[in-house]
């Protein structure tokens, strides 16, 4: 267990941040699954900008790595283009 007040505070802050980050990462994964499960190109195209915004925001605040964000966006764009 921590002995300093500052380290106790740091532990509390990290726990709050962990829950916050987990929530936003999970919500992004849910939306990505929703896009991948759709078979309608118009619906997927309409959903794509929202997902890109969400993924970019996660990468900006280091919840996910920027390369992972780019890979996700690329794969989703390929998926949308393959829909017919």
Image (cartoon, grey):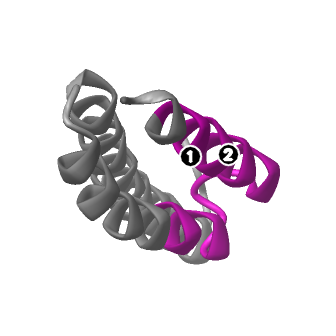
Magenta-drawn segment:
55-79
65 sits to left or right of 18: right
For the residues labelled 1 and 2, the Cα–Cα distance comes to 5 Å
Residue drawn at x 35%, y 39% as measured from the top left: 32
Q: Are marks 1 and 2 in contact (CB under 8 Å)?
A: yes
75 sits to left or right of 40: right
Residue drawn at x 72%, y 44% as measured from the top left: 68
Looking at the image, which is closer to me, 6 or 11? 11
Residue on which the image places disc 1 = 77
Please check the rendered image and state whether residue 65 is part of the magenta-colored stretch, yes or no. yes
Which label was assigned to residue 17? none
Residue 80 in the image, given as x and y percentages of width and height: 45, 40
In the picture, which quadrant includes the N terminus?
top right
Looking at the image, which is closer to me, 48 or 12? 48
Please check the rendered image and state whether residue 63 is part of the magenta-colored stretch, yes or no. yes
Looking at the image, which is closer to me, 80 or 8? 80
Tag count? 2
23 sits to left or right of 12: left
Residue on which the image places disc 2 = 74
Residue 18 in the image, given as x and y percentages of width and height: 42, 52
Residue 77 in the image, given as x and y percentages of width and height: 56, 46
**Furthest residue toward right:** 67
- Helix, strand or loop for disc 1: helix
Q: Up-down: is 60 above or below 16?
A: below
Crowd around label 1: few <14 · some 14–19 · many ≥20 (10 Å): some
Q: Quadrant of residue 16?
A: bottom left
Crowd around label 2: few <14 · some 14–19 · many ≥20 (10 Å): few
Residue drawn at x 67%, y 45% as measured from the top left: 74
């Amino acid at each position: 267990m921590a002995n300093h007040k500052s380290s106790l505070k740091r532990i509390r802050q990290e726990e709050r941040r962990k829950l916050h980050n987990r929530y936003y990462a999970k919500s992004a994964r849910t939306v990505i699954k929703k896009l991948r499960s759709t078979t309608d190109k118009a619906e997927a195209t309409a959903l794509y900008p929202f997902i890109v915004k969400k993924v970019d925001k996660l990468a900006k605040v280091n919840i996910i790595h920027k390369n992972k964000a780019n890979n996700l966006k690329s794969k989703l764009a390929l998926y949308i283009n393959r829909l017919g």
